[in-house]
Image (cartoon, grey):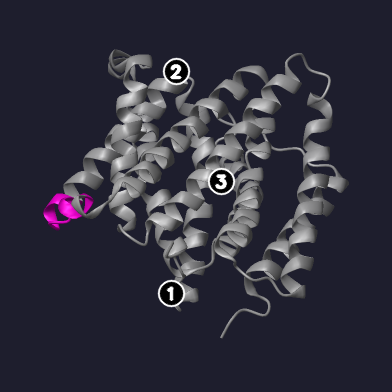
Amino acid sequence: MNLHRASDHWRLGLLLSLITAACWATLPIALKLVLQELDPITLTWFRFIVAAVFTGSWLGWRGRLGGYRALDGRNWAMLGVAALMLVGNYVFYLLGVQHTTPANAQLLIQLAPLLMALGGIWVFGERFRVAQWLGLTLLAAGMGLFFYDQLAASARAPGYVLGSSLVIVGAVVWAIYALLQKQLLVRLGSMQILCFIYVVASIVLLPFSDPSALLRLDALHWALLAYCAFNTIGAYGAFAEALAHWEASRVSAILATTPLLCIVAAWAVHALWPQWLAPERIAPIGWIGAALVVAGSAAVSLLNRRR
């Protein structure tokens, strides 16, 4: 099988990875505020339907909707599995949130980019030098310390094990989706892949959603909902293009910093509108873990890069 290889535009891949991380870091804050008025399934369905309409319209305007005719049975199977994996990521994550705290779920889902890094090495043969392996070790150790700090208070809560297990399953299926998407870039453009996934996700989630609830939103929550919807387009569009220009393992290292960016964004929102969001609380061991995550991410992504 002809495996996908990243282009030589590593700077563009780095920029797109940072944009993806910034989008995903601010998304949980907006979601938390919208969930005050809207149930999780309807919110997720709305994000996917808006993404499907805009992405499909853009592809139609560019005359690129016909690209699917070139797919064989193997590619269609991969595309279908990728769509189901992304939907599964959302479903398992939402089920996990029902049994554990949102902060716990948000931290555990960050196992996904680490799993994608390992998958990139195993599936695509992406090569790590000593500096990259050291960085990956630091990144994993830092995430462990950060998890320990943030999750210690939740470990004794009812449903913690079940909820955490569901979120971890969500991380696994997301990593599978990401690796399938990278391979599908051999036959389709990133927007064509995402358009199909958005359409499938919209259809799958529709029976479980309540579109009439949208009519009860006020202007503020409509604005936040719109941001959540367009965040989907921007984040996954940038993520897909990043995979086209940079190795999956290095894209994943940048995405691993998302929890730290989210903390910064949460503090900014709390400073400006304290009634909206409570501040994050991090003990010294958590800050040590955060520093290791940043150092490990930098080592994996930037040191000894291929020239």
Mark 2 and mark 1: span between their CA atoms? 41 Å
Left or right: residue 183 versus residue 252 is left
> Quarter-wise, where is residue 294 in the image?
bottom right
Residue at x 76% of width, y 13% of height:
158
For mark 1, what is the residue? 7
Quadrant housing the N terminus: bottom left
Amino acid beneath label 2: Asp
Residue 175's tag is 3
Residue 26 in sight? yes
Can the viewer see residue 261?
no
Q: Which residue is mark 2?
A: 39
- Which span of residues is magenta-colored? 59-68
Task: Kindly identify the residue that appears in the image at 69 percent across and 27 percent down.
Answer: 165
Amino acid type of the residue that numbered disc 1 sits on in the rendered structure: Ser
Query: Which of label 2 and label 3 is nearer to you?
Result: 3
Secondary element at image label 1: loop
Q: In the rendered structure, which disc, 2 or 3, sits on the residue that comes first in sequence?
A: 2
